[in-house]
Image (cartoon, rainbow, N blue to C red):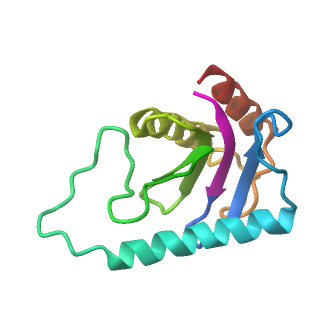
Amino acid sequence: MKVLSLYLLNKSGGLIYQRDFNPESNGINKLSSNDYLITAGTLHSIHAIVAGLTPPVLHPIQENQTGNQNQTGLFQVETERFNLFIYQTLTGLKIISIVQKGVSQETATRFMANIHSIYSDYVMKNPFYTLDMPIKCQLFSNKVLLLSEAS
């Protein structure tokens, strides 16, 4: 699986982490920091709109095996050049991955569950990290890079 880009959004839709992987070779244009913020806010808003349009569930939703709590919102967007997947945690953190065309939802969800595990270990356990602020932890960035290369 080739990961092209990764976004982490806090529960308010603020972009707290963004990384492009091999931007020269993957065919996705590099955006300005303001464009990344706009993209994150737009994806958060679309997710909220889709969740509001989804009919209510008559039975309790069981957590799936990967821990993805994205039960009523936007799951996946397919384009001619890439697929975009959204993974949501119980705390409202959204992990958005843009991957090469043809990657299955199960594979992308497993990748994002691993990102969530790394986030829990290297960001949330960091005593210097302030909740909902941009992630500036080098250990987290290194682990994300290793995971993206291994996938």
Question: Quick one: 95 or 124, which is closer to the camera?
Answer: 95
Callout count: 0
Q: Is residue 142 above or below residue 112?
A: above
Is 3 included in the stretch rendered in magenta?
Answer: yes
For the question of whether residue 83 can be seen, the reply is: yes
For the question of whether residue 88 can be seen, the reply is: no
* Horizontal and vertical percent position of residue 92: 49, 63
Q: Which residues are magenta?
A: 1-8
Quadrant in the rendering for residue 45: bottom right
Q: Is residue 116 above or below residue 92?
A: above
Residue at position x 76%, y 59% in the image = 134
Q: Which secondary structure type mostly characterizes the magenta part of the structure?
A: strand
Q: Is residue 129 above or below residue 64?
A: below
Is 143 included in the stretch rendered in magenta?
Answer: no
Quadrant in the rendering for residue 130: bottom right
Residue at position x 43%, y 55% in the image = 75
Q: Give the left or right position of residue 51, taking residue 84 as reference.
A: left
* Horizontal and vertical percent position of residue 88: 46, 55
Residue lying furthest front: 80
Residue lying furthest left: 59
* Horizontal and vertical percent position of residue 78: 51, 50
Q: In the picture, which quadrant includes the C terminus? A: top right
Residue at position x 12%, y 64% in the image = 59
Q: Give the left or right position of residue 114, taking residue 42 as reference.
A: left
